[in-house]
Amino acid sequence: MMMTITRNADGQTYQLENDLLSVTVNPERGADILSMIWRPTETEILWRNPRVGGLPPLRGDYDPDPRSYFDNYPGGVQELFPNAGAATEIEGTTLPFHGEALRRPWAVEHTESTLTCTTVLTRYPFAMTKTFRLDGGVLHISALVENISETELPVHWGFHPAFNTGTVARSGRVYGPFEAVTSHPDSFSSSQRHAPGSLVDASPVDGVGGFDLAPQGSRTADLLYATVSEGWFGLRSPGTHLLVTMSWPADVFPELWIWEEAHAPGGYPWWGTAHIVAIEPHTTSPFAPLESEPAALRIPGGETLKIDLTLGVQPINQEELPLGMDTTGVARLGVRA
């Protein structure tokens, strides 16, 4: 299937396209994925922040206040590195909320089949690379981090895809190789569907469990976690004949975070206006600043760590369910009694 890569008219973003997918990447800030469209039905798969007004955000600053993140949050997919929690102090420097990588400009090169983005952090001694390519209905992402110092350093690492709650994440269900989902141990919002620290049984069948997202009309906000035995999940919604999948190495990202912002009453940043669902593979849980993380991944000086992820879309019949993933990032479908 032929693929094209073009620079968009805004001079900032790049478009990867084939017959099934159209993907927008923003190297100017974070090498974020701003949009992913299933072309046969022109369905936007990712949640896009309407308050951004369609303009790709420019590079950010290093203000530790989380408002500097929310003010520029476009939706889509971010890479959270080297800190996935609140602003934190490590080795004499402040790492901002959700990390530095998503605020940095990334250099870009491309061939006929791949888009490669690179950056070097300023607060933490890491070089980073992301390479994107399309294969059918699957976006392949290779991500590499390199500790360019001589010091072993702790890191958080995760990917933060937010999905369109008007289509594929509307009152949806998350499937994956997990037995239960656990709510964040502390109060997360003034209106939660799941009490702090509560356990939700995923009732796995043949190793695949399921978790129901907040239904349309909810006024709740929750953050939940699942430990996966394999690195994948599938997301589908009633009446939507599309399955969204993601896969990754579970030995690096054994934790899955599920963030739901469903018109919860309150002030900044959402004011009760937003319905967002993010399903995120991470190195650890729960959400916490890196300085207080006892089980943080540690990368020795001079060493690199590389992972391969997929983000895919495929048709699915109403009676079918995802039962696992193949090596190309396509879900194996089946019918369970």
Image: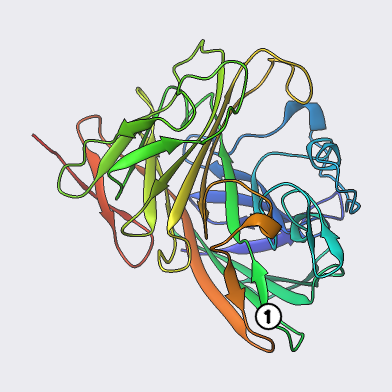
Q: Which residue is mark 1?
A: 146
Q: Residue 200 or 326: which is nearer the viewer?
A: 200
Q: Position of residue 212 (x, y in %)?
A: 36, 27
Element carrying mark 1: strand
Residue drawn at point x = 67 percent, y = 81 percent:
152
Q: Is residue 214 left or right of residue 144?
A: left
Residue 15 seen = no
Is residue 241 shown above or below 126?
above
Is residue 139 shown above or below 22?
below
Q: Residue 63 or 312: which is nearer the viewer?
A: 63
Q: Quadrant of residue 277?
A: top right
Residue drawn at point x = 82 percent, y = 40 percent:
72
- Viewport quadrant of the C terminus: top left
Q: Is residue 231 left or right of residue 89?
A: left
Residue type at mark 1 is: Glu
Q: Residue 222 or 103: which is nearer the viewer?
A: 222
Residue drawn at point x = 68 percent, y = 61 percent:
81
